[in-house]
Amino acid sequence: MKNLNFIALIPFWIIEGLMAVFTAWLIKKGSKIKTPKEAWKVLFLLSMMAQMFISVVLYLYFPSALPEIILLGNFVMMAEIFALGVMYFLGEPKTLDEIIGGVVRLRSIIIALIIALVLLSDVFTAWSLALVGGMASVAGGLQEVFTTLTYSSSSFWFIFMMSSEMAITVFFIRERLPKALIWLVAAQTIIMILSPTAVANSTWASISLAAGNAVMTFLFIYIFRFLQKNQMLSRVILNYLIFLMMTYALMMAGQFIWLLSGNAAVFALSIAVEMLMYLGIVLDEKTLVSSQLVSWQSMLYWVFGFLFLIFIIEFFMGGIVTIQVFGQGFFNGILTAATTWPLTRILSAGFYIGTMAIFTAWLIKKGSEIKTLIDTGIVLFLLSMMATIFVSTVIYAYAQASITLLELVTVNIAVDGLTAFAIIFSSYKKNEGAVWNKLGNIKPILIGLIIALVILSEVFMGWTFALLGGTISISGSLQGIYSSLIHSSSSFWFIFMMSSEMAITLFFIRNKLPKAFIMIMASQTVIMILSPTAIASAFWTNFSLAAGSAIMILLFIYVFEFLYKNRVIRSGILNYLLFLMMAYALMMVGQFIWLLSGNSAVFVLSIIVEMAVYFGIAVDERKLDSSKSANWQSKPYWVLGFLGFLFIAEFFMGAVLNIQAYGTGFFSSIIVPTSGSFWQTIGTSFYNFIIFFGTVTLSPWYLIMMGIEMGALVAFRIKYTRELETKVMFALMILAYGLYTILVPVFILPAEVLRQTPWLGWTMGIGSSGALGPTVLLALLGTFLISGILSFLFGSRQLCSVICMAPLMYQGTTIDAMRSFNGTSQIARKLLTNKISAFYKVAASAVWISLLVAGVISYLTSVGILNFSIFGIDPAFFLYIFYFGFLWYVLWMLIPFVGTYACVSTGMCGWGSFNQCVSRVGLFRLKVTDKATCSRCPTMDCAYVCPTGLTDLPSEFIAKGEYRNYKCIGCGNCVSACPYQIMSFYDVRHWLREKLRFESDNSALRKKESQPY
Ligand code: SF4
Ligand code: SF4
Ligand code: SF4
C-alpha cells in the first residue's frame, strides 16, 4: 500500500461522496417501498451501480476481456428490464403484501436483495477506486486478490464511504426511528468511522482505537440504561441488540487479530456484518415497533447471550489495550503455544471435544434423573461404552506391535455386551420397579460407578487426543506411560474438556439446584478452567494463577457467608463443602509442587478429586434436600476439617503466589539439609517445618490474601452491627491490617529496616522481628512505653481489637459465629473463665521466660559476647516465627476446641498479656447506664457473646455499674448484644469529659456561691 496523497485523491473522495449520498437516498427509498414497481426501481438502480463497479474491477484484473464484461453487464440489465415487462404484463397488484397470498414474505426477500446489492456495490466501489487510485496493485493470484479485497474493504475507501452512507441515511429517516434507536445507529456510525484500519497511520490507529472503544463503552452504558427503563421491548429490538453485540464481538476480535498479525480479514467481515445489521434496521424499521412485546427479563437465554457477548467484547477490548500499552510481544507466549497446531486440527479436535463434553454432560444429567435400576443400567452402559472406546484407543497406541485392531474391537464388544447383559439381567429379575429411593446400599455404589466411569473416560479421552495431537510421545516404558498420563491429564486436553463438561452439566441441572449451589459450582468450573498447567505458556501460568486464586478467594468468602446465614443445613451440603475444601487444599498443594519441581501428579489427583465431588453432587443432587439437617455449630470435627482444609488451601495459595512474585528461590534458601544423628535429624526437620510454615504465613501474598478474605467477613459484620463505635472499630481494624500488616512492612520498609523496627515486629516476639541489637533495644522500650500508654488510656482494645492482625481473623461474621464453641467445648470452657486459669499462668510464664531468654541471648550475640543462633537465625526471630507464624494459626484452626481468641485465653501471646495487664489498671472499662435494668434482664446476652469467655458481666454490672477484667479486649460484642442498649465503653475520652465537667460544675458553683443573695 502506498502513502496517502490527499490532494491527488480529491476526485476519488468526490466520487465516493456522491455514491454515498446516492446510495443513502436509495436506501431511504427502499425503506418506503409499497408496491412491486417501487421495489423494482430501487433494485434496478442498485444493481446498475453494483454492476458498474464490478465491471471496473473485472476490467482492471482482465483488461483483455472488456467486450465480454460489457456484454455481461448489458445482459444483466436486459434481464432486469425484461422482469419489469413481465410484471406489467401480469398486471401489478396494489401492495406487496397482497402478492402470493402472504405465503412468501416477499418484503423480506426484497429487503435482503437491497442489502446484498448495497453491500456488493459498496465493496466493489471501494475496490475499484483503490485500484484506480493506485493504492492497491492488480496482482493475479487468488491470495493477492483476497489481500487487495481485504485491504480495500478495511481501508478508508470502504469505511469512510460506508460511514457517510450510514450518517446520511440516518438523517433521511430520522423522523421514522424511535429516539433511542437514533442514538444507537448514530453511535454505530461513529464507531464505523473510527475503524483503526481505515488510515495506515499509527496516530490514527491509536486515536481511533481509544476513541472507538470509548464510544462503544458509552453505547453499552446507554443500552443498559435503555434496558433498565424499558422492561418490555419488541422482539425485533431485542434481536437487533443481540446481533449488534455479536457484531461488535466479531469486530473486537477482528481488531485484536489485526493488531497482532496485520490480517484485517475478520475485521472487514465484522464491518460487512455491521452494515448488514444496520441496513436491516433502517430498511425495515416498522417491525421495530410492530413486533410482539416481551419482557427481556423473562428471556434468560437472551440475557445470558447479551452478557456473554459483552464479556467477549470487553475481553478483546482488554487485549487491544494491552497490545497498545505493552506491544505485540505481550501475547507472543500464547501465540507460539497455540500456533504449533494448524487451525484445521484445532477445529476438528475442538469439535470432538465439544461433542464428547455435551454427550457426557447429558449422561450425567440422565444420571441425576435416574428413577429405576434400568435407568442406571442404561447410563452405565453408555458411559462404559465411551470409556472402553478411549481406553482401547490408548492401549492400541501403546501396544500396536502386540495387539491387532480386531482383538481390540472384540474386547470392546465383549465389555459392552457384558454391560448390556447386566441390564437385561436386572430387568429379567423384575428389578425395573426398584425405585432409586429404595435402592439402599447399592445407591452409593452405583453413583460411585457413574462418577468413576465419567472420570475414566475423560482421562483416557484427554490421553487419546494428546497422543493423536502429537503433544505427548508414545514411550513404552512404565515411567514414559506414567509421564504421558500425567501430562495429558494436566494439559488443556483434559482440563478444558472437563471444565466444558462441568459447565454444560451445570446448565442442564441448574433448575434442580439451590441458588447458592449454582454459584459454588459455577466458581468450581471457572477455577478448573484456570488450571495453570493447561497451557504451557508463561502468560497463561501467571494469568491463571492470579485469576484462579482470586476466584477461589471469592468462593471462600461466599461459602463463609453462606454458612453464616445458614446455620442449620443438610448434612449432604456440609459433606459437599468439606470435600470441596479438601479438593482445593490438594489442588493448591499440587500447584505448589508443580511450580517448584514441574511435577503435576498431585495437581492431577486434585482435579480428579474435585471432579468426583462435583459430579457426585450433579448425579445425586437429591441428597442436598433429602439428607438430615444439622447445625454446623454443633459439629466441632466438621468445623475443624473445614478450617483445616481451608487453611491448607490458603497456605499453599500464598506459597504459590509468593513463588510467582519472588521466584522459587523464595523457599529454596531457607531449608537446611537434614543429617547427623536421629535427634539431630528430628531437630533439623522441626526447624525446617517451622521456618517453612512461618515463611509462608508471614509472607506478603499470604497476608494480602488472608486480609482480603477475612477483611470481607469483617466488612459484612459492619453491615450487621448496630452502634457506630463498634462499626468504626471494625473499619479501623481493616484499615490497620492493610496499613500495618501489609502496606508498611511489605511495600514501604525494606526487610532489613523492618527487622530493626520494634513497633512493626512486636507480634509475639520479644519486640522485633530481627536480632535484638543495642539500637533496637531503646526503640523496643519506646514501643512498650507507647503501647502501654495507649492501653492505659484506651484499653488493650487498641491492640487486640484494632492494630493486631488477629482481630481481623476472629471478628468476621462466620468466624465470630464459631464463638458458640466457647460454651460447648470442654477445653474452651476451662480456658475461658473470668479468672486467670492455671493453664494460663503456666503458658504465659513459659512464653515470657522464653522471650526474655531469647532476647538476652539475641542481645549478647549482637554485642559480640555470645555467638548463638538457630541454624543461622537469631533466637528472638525464631521465637517470633514459632509463636506468631505457626502456633497462632494452629490455635485458629482449633477454634472448635479451644474457642475464639485463644491467643488471649491461653496466654500464649506475650505482647497481648503485657497490654492486657496495663489495661486492667488503666482507665478502660465497660459501663451501664442503669444497674436496675441489668438486675431485671431476662437474657443476659452480654455474657453469652464474649469471645474471651467473660461471663460475670451482669453480676458486676448489678453490683458496680461497670466492668473491668484483665481479659477484656474491648471487642464490643457485649455492647452490641445488650437488648436494652444500656452498655457503653469508657476510656480516657470519657474520663476527660467527666473531669472537665466536674471543673466547670465546680467553677459554676463557686461563681454562684460568690454571688450576693
Ligand atoms: S492476644 Fe496477641 S495475638 Fe491475640 S489479639 Fe492480642 S495482641 Fe493479637
Ligand atoms: S444484656 Fe444488657 S441489660 Fe442484660 S445484663 Fe447485660 S448489660 Fe445488663
Ligand atoms: S467483655 Fe465485652 S468487650 Fe470485653 S472482651 Fe468480652 S465481649 Fe468483648
Image (cartoon, rainbow, N blue to C red):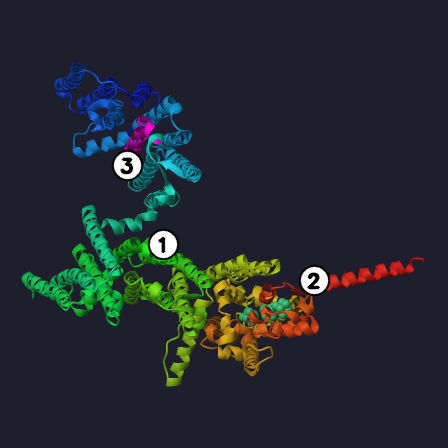
Which amino acid does the dot numbered 3 rest on? Ala
Q: Is residue 529 above or below residue 769?
A: above
Number of numbered labels in the structure image: 3
The percent coordinates of residue 89 (x first, y second) are 16, 14
Relative placement, left or right, of 933 versus 703 is: right
Circle 1 residue: 543
Query: Mark 3 touching mark 2, by CB under 8 A?
Result: no
Name the quarter where the N terminus is drawn. top left
Which amino acid does the dot numbered 2 rest on? Arg
Name the quarter where the C terminus is drawn. bottom right
Circle 3 residue: 264
Which residues are drawn in magenta? 264-288
**Foreground residue among 429 and 887:** 429
Which amino acid does the dot numbered 1 rest on? Phe
Quarter, ligand 2: bottom right
Tell which tag, 2 or 1, sits nearer the viewer: 2
The residue shown at (16%, 64%) is 475
The percent coordinates of residue 435 (x first, y second) are 23, 65
